[in-house]
Image: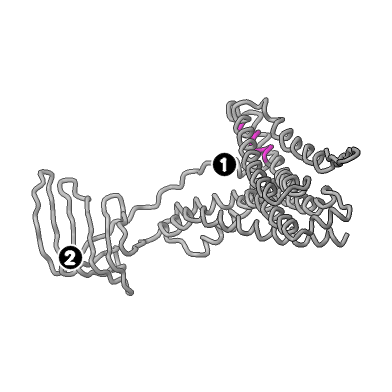
Amino acid sequence: MIINWYIFKHTFNNVFISTSVFVGIIWLSQSFKSIKLIINKGAGLSEFFILSAYSLPSWLLIAIPFGTFTGCMISYLKLENDKEILVMKSAGISPFNLSRPAFLIAILASMILFIISHFIMPETYRNFKVLQNDIRNSSQSLILKDNIFIDLNEKQTIFINKLNENNELEEIFIQDRSDPSSLVELFSKKGYLNFKDNLILRMDNGTRISTDLKGKSTLLNFKIYDVEIKQEKNKVNEPRVIEYKEYNFFDLLKKATNAGNKKGKLLAEAHSRNTIVFMPLVFSFIVMITILKDDFSRVFSIYRKTIGIGLLVIIQSLVLIIKNAVHSNIIFLPLMYIFPIFIIVICIFLLNKKKVYKLSLFTKKVI
C-alpha cells in the first residue's frame, strides 16, 4: 500500500505537469489566430483570455491523453533508473501490481475526459464561437495602428508611421478611390483627427497627387487639407454555421438520423466523445509494457522506450484513420470501440503473463 501510494504520488505530479505543458504548447500554437482577431477588431485583453478559457476544454481533450503517457513514462523511467523497480520486483511485486498506480491515474483521466467531452466542451465551444463571431462583427468607430496599412472603408486606405497621444499623427499616407475618374494619394508630415461632427483627418504640410484614368498625374502641395473619413454602416450579422463540436452526444445522434451523406461524420463525432476516454488507459498500458515487461539490459531498455513512443504515434494515427473511415462508411463504427479495448486486453494479458522456468542439469532457461 505504501509503495503504491509512493508511485501514485510521483506519477500524479508528473502527469499534471506534463498535461499543463501540453496545454501551454497548444495555447501558444492556437492563440495567434485569437490575437490577430483581437488586434484587427480592437477588442480588449479580457476578450482574449475569455476566448482562451472557452477553448481550454477542447485543448484538454488533446493534452490529457498525451500528458498521461508522458507523466507515466517520466515516473516509471525514474523508478527504473534508480533501480527501484528492480528492488520491487525482487521483493515479489508483479509488473501488474506495479502498474496499478498508473492505471488509477489513467482511470481518473478517463473520467475527466468523459465529463469534458459530454458536458463541458459543447457548451464552452459554443460560447467560444459566439464570442468570436461577435468580435468579428463588432464595429469600432476607428482603429488606427502604427506602420500598418488599414482599410478605413472600401475606398480609403491609410498608413501612419507614428501615432501620438491626443489623436496626433506623423508621416501619413492616404489612398482615396472615392472618385471613379481618378485616384487620389495624399502625403503629409503631420495631422490630427477631429471627431466633433463628421470624422475629419486634418493634414498639415503635405502633397496631393491625383491620377486620372489615362495615367496623367496632377501634383498639389498644401499647408492644410481636410479629408473626410467615410465609415461603413454596420452590416447585418449573418447567421453563423454551427459546428459539430457545439452539439452534445444525443444531439449528434438525433441529427445523424436525417443527415444523409453527413451521417457518418455526425456518428463519428458523437462516438468519439466515448472512445476518447479509452486513450489514457491505452497510453498508460503502452508505458507499462515497454518499461515493466521482462528484464533487459539498459541499452535494450532505451530501445524499448523508443518503441513505446512509436506505438503511441501508430495507435493515435490508427484511431484517426478509423474515425475518418466512419465518415464515408458507418460499417467501421464498431472499430472505434473494438480497437482501443483490444489493445487494453492484450496489454493486461502481457502484464499478467508470468515467466516459466525450465531447469536442466547444468543450466536454467527462462521462457
Residue at 86% across, 54% down: 90
Q: Is 140 displayed left or right of 208 in the figure?
A: right
Q: Nearer the viewer, residue 106 or 258?
A: 106
CA separation, marks 1 and 2? 50 Å
Q: Residues within 10 Å of mark 2 (few under 14, many from 20)?
A: some
Image quarter in which the C terminus is found = top right
**270 part of magenta stretch:** yes
Which percent across, then down, holds residue 51? 55, 57
The type of residue carrying mark 2 is Tyr
Image quarter in which the N terminus is found = bottom right
- Which element type, helix, strand or loop, lies under badge 2? strand
| Tag 1 and tag 2, C-beta contact below 8 Å | no
Q: Circle 1 sits on which residue? A: 243
Which percent across, then down, holds residue 156? 26, 54
- Which element type, helix, strand or loop, lies under badge 1? loop
Q: Is 13 displayed left or right of 185 in the figure?
A: right
Q: Which residues are magenta?
A: 263-272
The type of residue carrying mark 1 is Glu
Magenta-highlighted stretch: main secondary structure?
helix
Q: Circle 2 sits on which residue? A: 225
Q: Residues within 10 Å of mark 1 (few under 14, many from 20)?
A: few
Residue at 70% across, 44% down: 279
Q: Nearer the viewer, residue 353 or 362?
A: 362
**32 part of magenta stretch:** no
Which percent across, then down, holds residue 111? 75, 50
On screen, residue 133 above or below 358: below
